Amino acid sequence: MLVIDGLAKQYPTGDRALKGVSLTVPKGQIMALIGPSGAGKSTLIRCVNRLVEPTSGRVTIDGQEITRLSRRGLRQARRRMGMIFQEFALVERLTVMENVLSGRLGYVGFWRSWLRRFPAADVAAAFTLLERVGLAGFEDKRADALSGGQRQRVGIARALLQNPTLLLVDEPTASLDPKTSRQIMRLLRELCRERGLAAIINIHDVALAQMFAERIVGLKSGEIVYDGPADGLSAEVLTTIYGEEDWSQTIRPADEEGEDAGGGASPHDPAVPVDRERLAGLT
Ligand SMILES: Nc1ncnc2c1ncn2[C@@H]1O[C@H](COP(=O)(O)OP(=O)(O)OP(=O)(O)O)[C@@H](O)[C@H]1O
């Protein structure tokens, strides 16, 4: 369980990005964070794992106060927080498998990771995860040869290989087409359910947030102005969050008809033969 209590962030420029945000995200809950540009969504997500240092307030995960940890303690605690970014943050010239295994860097020692020699169990777990995210057969493909949706799947597999209890997801669909965006959101929801993972997803697309998150938190100017169920997002609430607008086209019923429920890789993506022997060299 994640508990955020009175979190505030003032950047050195004077910008007050967060003004005392408090919320609790229970195990297994998917929470979408919405709000206009500059509302503080990214700052909030980054304060949870202290990529951005909060000015004041507390962040606690499963009883451990993250905001009090030393650098070393923080490094260990970050293993439990899987981070998934908009821009995928893959190492382009490395293979899919190598990118996924980099999720274990917080666990294996420096020399092992530098030499990219990972325990056999990690490699086996990475194979299983790649299969789960629909990328079986892509292990040996270079990251820069993948489509946006495939890259995001690699990012998800990498985050899950950490064995996190919480996912921090920053605009996962910002550079994806609408169908791929749905597939990625569905995959995230399924994985959270399967693993009892909590997730905070910073997302601009209100309809997608409504469709895939059970809880929506609306931020405006560093403060929570809505915290409730997805179907509570009325035109009035959206006006409070974003300002006056015609919201009738934005608010959609949570229907997913006509979607591909498999979440697998596109049939147009040629499968790549897996060189298991070469990958065995990583162990
Ligand atoms: N590194 C920084 N230095 C100074 N100010 C910053 C920094 N990062 C963010 N801010 C400011 O903090 C406020 C919140 O920014 P943040 O990026 O968290 O908002 P956001 O809701 O994620 O926006 P967007 O949806 O556009 O990504 C903004 O006023 C922004 O200008």
Image (spheres, rainbow, N blue to C red):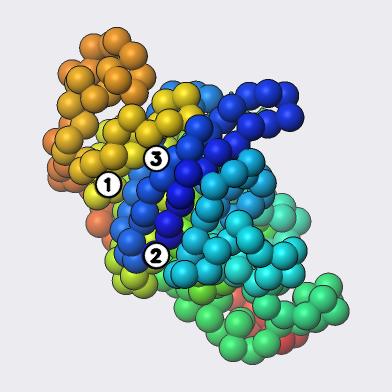
Measure the C-alpha gap from mark 3 to mark 2: 17 Å
Q: Residue at x 27, y 46 (%)?
A: 215
Where's the C terminus, which quadrant? bottom right
Q: Quadrant of residue 245?
A: top left
Q: Amino acid at mark 1?
A: Arg
SS at badge 2: loop
153 lies left or right of 145:
left
Can you give x and y, in whole percent of width and height, for residue 194 in the image?
32, 71
Query: Do the residues under discs 3 and 1 have CB atoms within 8 angstroms?
Result: no
Q: Are marks 2 and 1 in contact (CB under 8 Å)?
A: no
Work out whether 249 lies above or below 215: above
Residue 43 position, x and y percent, is 57, 39
Q: Residue at x 51, y 74 (%)?
A: 163
Q: Is residue 77 left or right of residue 30?
A: right
Q: Residues within 10 Å of mark 1 (few under 14, many from 20)?
A: many
Q: Name the residue located 67 percent from the left edge and 59 percent from the top edge.
A: 142
Q: Position of residue 12 (x, y in %)?
A: 73, 29
Judge from the rendering whether residue 120 lies leftward or rightward of residue 212; answer left or right: right
> Does residue 75 show up?
no
Mark 3 and mark 2 lie on one chain; the one further toward the N terminus is 2
Q: Which residue is mark 2?
A: 1
Specify the amino acid type for callout 2.
Met
| Label 2 to label 1: alpha-carbon separation | 15 Å
Q: Quadrant of ligand 1?
A: top right
Which residue sits at x=45%, y=40%?
21
Residue bearing mark 1: 215
Find disc 3 in the rendering and name its residue. Answer: 33
